[in-house]
Every structure is written in C-alpha cells, then in structure tokens.
C-alpha cells in the first residue's frame, strides 16, 4: 500500500514507488509479446494470459493513483473475459494503454526537499520547544505552518505566519499588563504596554521590580521591532522576503516566544 502522505523519505519513495513502477514497466514489456495469430480470437490459454496481464496493469495503476489508465484497463479486462479478443484488437488496445499511461505520467510531479528542509517540514508539534507549546497552544498552528513554508521556500508566507505567532505573544503581554488588545492596532497595544512599563517605576525597589521591567521592556522593544521591520509590510502586502529574511525572522520570533514562555508570569 502506498503512503499518500505529502512527504516521504527518498528511500521510501525508491522502495515503494520504484517497486510499483518496475512492476508497471515489466507488465508493459509483456505487451510486446502479444500472440501473433490470425484474425480470429486467441486460444483460451492466451486469453487467460491477456486477462491476467490487464488485471495486473489495472491494479498497479490503481495503487499509483492513475485512475484513468486503471479504469480503461478494468473495462478492457471485462471485455476480454466475456469473449477472447483478436490479436489485432489486443495490439490496438495496448498501444492506447501506453499512450494513456504516458499522458498520466506527464501529469505527475515530485517535489524534492533536502535533509534540512525535510526536517523543517516534518517538524514535530513543538518546533519552538515545550515551554512555548505549553504557554502558547494557540500559536502551534502558525508555528508549524511557518516551518513548512520555510522548508518549501515560501519565504514571505513564512514571515506572515511568524507575525501571527508574535501576535500571540503580544496578546499575552497585553493581558498580563491590563492593556486592551481586541480590535486594537499593534502600535496602540505596544504604546499601552510601554506606558505600563513606565508605571513600574513606581513600584518599590527590589529584584521583582527589576525583573518585571527587564522582561516587559525587552518584549515591548522586540514587538516594536517586529512591527516596524516586518509585520506592517507582510500584513499589508508591501513586502517580499527571501530565505535570509525568513530565517532571520524565524530566529527572532522563536527567541522572543521562548523568552516570554520562560519569564512572563503565569
């Protein structure tokens, strides 16, 4: 049974698909040895051989997802079972089979991913680590999509998904500081966060104050950088990003989310 997952290892492809294609090729070779008889129907033993051959071709095409060829051969198999065909009929049918198979092969494309890209595409459910996954479960979808887009060289889409991830961090930070978030623009929320950070100066001196100021200030600075450097351009369709850009954003957003997951109070 062929694995129809969107991504398989090269070895799996060679081991599974190559076996099917080899079988198909061998069966196609048998087509070259159609009995050369007079115009009458082929003898019963040759009829059985032809029926079995077409049946095998139909099954192999089905397993490869070549539905048109499989259906055509299944219909011819039924015809051959009802009455023995003449050699010329078989030759004509097999020529058409070959053309149909070639047409379906031409419509199939394979996408190859290198080891690093395949690892990105196949990344498990927690590519940003356990802490981020546990603190920000709603970001999981966009984190996975960002990894897949980077693997597939869809760099602008990578940045778009990463900005959605960063927005989950912005929402969490705003909620922790009591800053309204719903329906607000990023710059409004960030200004609200920065205002709250300034208010922390009124807290009594001590390690807790220093830690909060550092965590919130760094997060606000990162978010403003995200907004000005990438988010505005990606969201409003003004930016196009290359691989270097996408990897840079991935590194920054991953670090930002990990920082929040580790230091943002529960």
Image: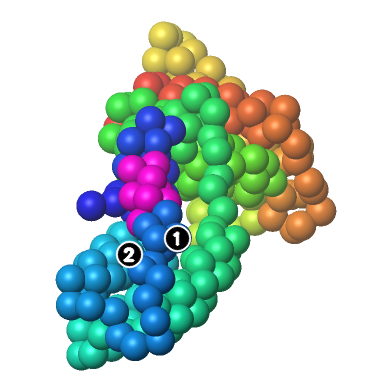
Q: Is 21 rendered above or below residue 99?
A: above
Which span is picked out in magenta? 18-27
Q: In which quarter of the image is residue 22?
A: top left
Q: Quadrant of residue 34?
A: bottom left
Which mark is on residue 193? none
Task: Tell me the crowding category of disc 1: few under 14, some 14 to 19, or many 20 or more residues within 10 angstroms, Cα based.
Answer: few
Residue at the image position 46 percent from the left and 75 percent from the top: 91
- Secondary structure under the numbered disc 2 in the rendered image: helix
Q: In this view, does 264 lie to the left or right of 219?
A: left
Nearer to us of marks 1 and 2 is: 1
Give the farthest residue toward the right. 238
In the rendered view of the protein, which quadrant contains the C terminus? top left
Where residue 180 sits in the image (x, y, percent)? 51, 54
- Per the model, the C-alpha gap separating discs 1 and 2 is 14 Å
**In front of the other: 101 or 46:** 46
Where residue 67 sits in the image (x, y, percent)? 39, 73
Q: In which quarter of the image is residue 260?
A: top left
22 in the magenta segment = yes
| Residue picked out by circle 2 | 57
Give the farthest residue toward the front. 38
Where residue 7 sits in the image (x, y, percent)? 41, 43
Residue at the image position 51 percent from the left and 72 percent from the top: 95
196 in the magenta segment = no
Residue 239 in view here: yes
Q: Is 70 rendered above or below residue 31?
A: below
Q: Earlier in the sequence, mark 1 or mark 2?
A: 1
Which mark is on residue 32? 1
| Pointer 1 with pointer 2, Cβ within 8 A | no
Q: Is the magenta stretch mostly helix, strand or loop?
A: helix
Q: Is residue 81 left or right of residue 4?
A: left
């Amino acid at each position: 049974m062929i694995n129809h997952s969107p991504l398989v290892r090269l070895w799996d492809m060679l081991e599974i698909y190559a076996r099917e294609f080899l079988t198909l090729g061998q069966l196609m070779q048998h087509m070259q040895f159609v009995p050369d008889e007079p115009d009458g129907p082929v003898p019963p033993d040759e009829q059985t051989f032809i029926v079995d051959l077409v049946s095998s071709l139909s099954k192999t095409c089905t397993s490869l997802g070549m539905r048109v060829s499989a259906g055509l051969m299944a219909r011819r198999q039924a015809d051959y079972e009802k009455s023995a065909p003449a050699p010329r009929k078989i030759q004509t049918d097999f020529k058409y089979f070959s053309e149909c198979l070639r047409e379906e092969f031409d419509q199939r494309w394979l996408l190859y991913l290198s080891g690093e890209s395949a690892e990105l595409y196949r990344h498990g459910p927690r590519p940003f680590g356990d802490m981020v996954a546990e603190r920000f479960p709603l970001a999981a979808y966009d984190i996975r999509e960002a990894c897949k887009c980077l693997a597939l060289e869809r760099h602008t889409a990578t940045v778009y998904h990463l900005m959605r991830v960063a927005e989950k961090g912005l929402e969490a930070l705003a909620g922790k500081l009591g800053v309204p978030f719903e329906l607000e623009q990023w710059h409004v929320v960030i200004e609200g966060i920065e205002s709250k950070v300034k208010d922390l100066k009124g807290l009594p001196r001590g390690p807790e104050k220093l830690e909060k100021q550092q965590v919130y200030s760094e997060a606000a600075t990162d978010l403003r950088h995200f907004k000005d450097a990438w988010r505005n351009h990606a969201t409003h369709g003004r930016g196009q990003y290359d691989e270097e850009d996408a990897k840079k954003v991935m590194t920054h957003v991953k670090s930002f989310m990990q920082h929040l997951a580790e230091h943002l109070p529960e």
